[in-house]
Structures are given as C-alpha cells and as structure tokens.
Amino acid sequence: MKERSVIVYPPVKYEGRKVEVDGVLVGRACGLRDLTEVLQRAGWEGLDEVDVLDLPAIEWHGGGPEAWSARG
C-alpha cells in the first residue's frame, strides 16, 4: 500500500493554511481542529487532534502545528 503524503503550506493572512493530500489541494485550515476535519474528509477516518500532531505523513511548511496566522 502506498504511503500517503500531506503538505500543510505556510499560513496566509486571513486565509489559514492550504492543505494538500497526495498532490491534491483538499482544503484550508485555520487551526488544528480544522486540519483534523480536512484530513478526515480526505479519507483519514477516526483521527483526532492528538493523532494529527503525531502523523508522520505531514510535511509542515512555514511553521509547525502551532503556526496558524501570517504576520503582516
């Protein structure tokens, strides 16, 4: 089975962070709860926020799980 990949892009002011799963843009997230919901809709059923923090498939760009707003 192919391992899935997730990219969480840098935060954009007033827009949150784009989320890409397996090369497809699947939504935006403004916090960890949003990210969890986006990933659940993309097929990761049963995840909670703690699971998302530990998910090795996530590649964080422009800050980790604590960075949700852009400066400036």
Image (spheres, helix red, strand yellow):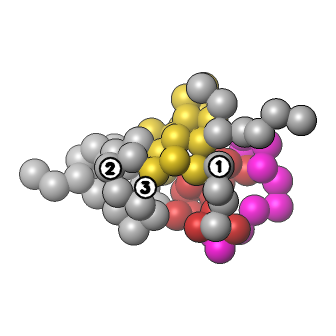
Q: What is the number of the mark on residue 62?
A: 2
**Residue neighbourhood size for the residue with mark 3, other residues' Cα within 10 Å, grouped as few (<14), some (14–19), many (≥20):** some
Q: Amino acid at mark 2?
A: Gly
**Residue neighbourhood size for the residue with mark 1, other residues' Cα within 10 Å, grouped as few (<14), some (14–19), many (≥20):** few
Could you tell me residue 24's position as x and y percent? 60, 26
Query: 32 or 9, which lies in front?
Result: 9
Marks 1 and 2 sit apart, C-alpha to C-alpha, by: 16 Å
Left/right placement of residue 52 relative to residue 66 reads: right
Magenta part of the chain: 41-50
Could you tell me residue 30's position as x and y percent? 43, 55
Left/right placement of residue 8 relative to residue 23 reads: left
- Name which residue lies at 78% across and 50% down: 44
- Name which residue lies at 75% across and 62% down: 47
Q: What is the number of the mark on residue 57?
A: 1
Q: Secondary structure at mark 1?
A: loop
Most extreme residue toward the bottom is 50
Q: Amino acid at mark 3?
A: Cys
Could you tell me residue 39's position as x and y percent? 67, 48
Is there any visible trace of residue 28 in the rendered image?
Answer: no
- Name which residue lies at 45% across and 51% down: 60
Marks 2 and 3 sit apart, C-alpha to C-alpha, by: 14 Å
62 above or below 54? above
Q: Are marks 1 and 2 in contact (CB under 8 Å)?
A: no
Q: Disc 3 marks which residue? A: 30
**Residue neighbourhood size for the residue with mark 2, other residues' Cα within 10 Å, grouped as few (<14), some (14–19), many (≥20):** some
Could you tell me residue 41's position as x and y percent? 72, 44
Left/right placement of residue 46 relative to residue 38 reads: right
Q: Amino acid at mark 1?
A: Ala
Q: Are marks 3 and 1 in contact (CB under 8 Å)?
A: no
Is there any visible trace of residue 12 in the rendered image?
Answer: yes
3 above or below 47? above
Q: Secondary structure at mark 2?
A: loop
